[in-house]
Image (cartoon, helix red, strand yellow):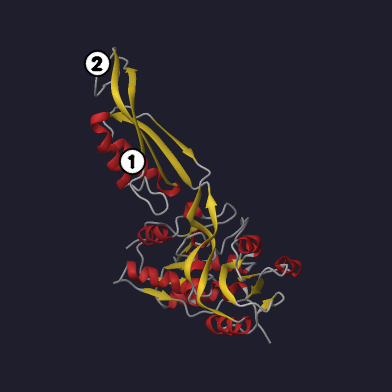
Amino acid sequence: MTVKDISNAIEELAPLQYAEDFDNVGLLTGTYDTKVTGVLVTLDTLENVVDEAIENNCNLIVSFHPIIFSGLKRITGSSYVERVILKAIKNDIAIYATHTALDNSIEGVSAKMAEVLGLNKTKILLPKSGLIKKLTTYAPQKDAEKVRKALRSAGAGSIGNYSDCSFNAQGQGTYRGNDNSNPTLGKKGELHTENETFISVVFEKHLEQNILKALHKQHPYEEVAYDIVTTDNVHQHIGMGMIGELPEELSEKDFFILLKEQFKLQAIRHSKLLQKPIKKVAVLGGSGSFAIDAAKRAGADVYISADFKYHEFYKAENELVLADIGHYESEQFTKNLLADYLTKKFRNFAIILSKSNTNPINYL
């Protein structure tokens, strides 16, 4: 088992292409070809977490938050970030981070929050656009189905709840090969006209290399004509946050009791209570003030996230209740999510859940 084997499995759940542009995800220290002795899963990679990895003979730390977020000009041990990197490198420990790639997964951070609250009828709160691409190609009519099948097998042609989607049209293609060509149909130096099928399929951004590999493998032509464009379509299964419904509506008081119990909270910062029942609940792990308007548009009765600033509580505007439960608290179950996922993927391998509490905030 190598680091690459583990990272490939994680990226099935949270492709790195779906991380936000500002983020720093993927392998941060170490090499992909390193043989893994054990995996420690954590929310944050701190010095005591590296110590925990050493104690458990784990040479790979899978972390939600990236310990390296912005550029480092030197590594001298003068900050906690530098000390972590030095200790990891000295002990041959690789560090891999998922962060916003997992935030944008339909089975990621916010989905886990929704699960803990028992929400049903869940969907993405802020679905992303620009992640769906469209491939157009042309194949001889007798080979069109073979090409379509190869593209489908590589993941193309899926739109929301539908699969095997494509657009096809018949037409004629022309080409003339030069002296160095080796045409499958026709003769070099002669203009050839072939009855062809125009094939158009959409696919998710992270599948592009697999799609192109399948196209070139199954297409009969020496030179394959194709083009790829990025669409503005919204992807309903990729994005930040989640919204769903409680099995039964609760009073605000009873809902906050449930919230405190399920997330083990000492305190909740919240906007004005509206004396209305709670049924529709929006959640977003980590700093989520940017999605307040989306929660309102979705008709949420309450929006649960973290790191709201003073003036952002005014944005509730008596339309919903804003509940700030704390950054760590909102994401605390993420390491359980990752550990459970990897344990199912690698049943006979040591996947260890970190026991370290990495919350930097304390309460009196």
Q: Determine if residue 42 is in view.
A: no
Say whether disc 2 or disc 1 marks the residue closer to the N-terminus.
2
Extreme-bottom residue of the structure: 364
Quarter of the picture containing the C terminus is bottom right
Q: Residue 16, relative to residue 350: is it above or below?
A: above
In this figure, which residue is indicated by the disc labeled 1? Answer: 213
- Circle 2/circle 1 CB separation < 8 Å: no
- For the residue pair 86 and 115, the one nearer the viewer reads as 115
Q: Position of residue 182 (x, y in %)?
A: 26, 21
Residue 184 lies left or right of residue 166; in this view the side is: left
Residue 349, image x and y in percent? 32, 71
The residue that disc 2 covers is 187
Residue 273 falls in which quadrant of the image? bottom right
With 322 as the anchor, is 192 left or right in this view? left
Q: Is residue 283 visible?
A: yes
Say which amino acid is labelled 1. Answer: Lys
Quarter of the image that includes the N terminus: bottom left
Identify the disc placed on residue 318: none
Kindly identify the amino acid type of the residue bearing the numbered disc 2.
Answer: Lys
Q: Residues within 10 Å of mark 2 (few under 14, many from 20)?
A: some
**Front-lying residue, 296 or 235:** 296
**Location of residue 56 by image quarter:** bottom left
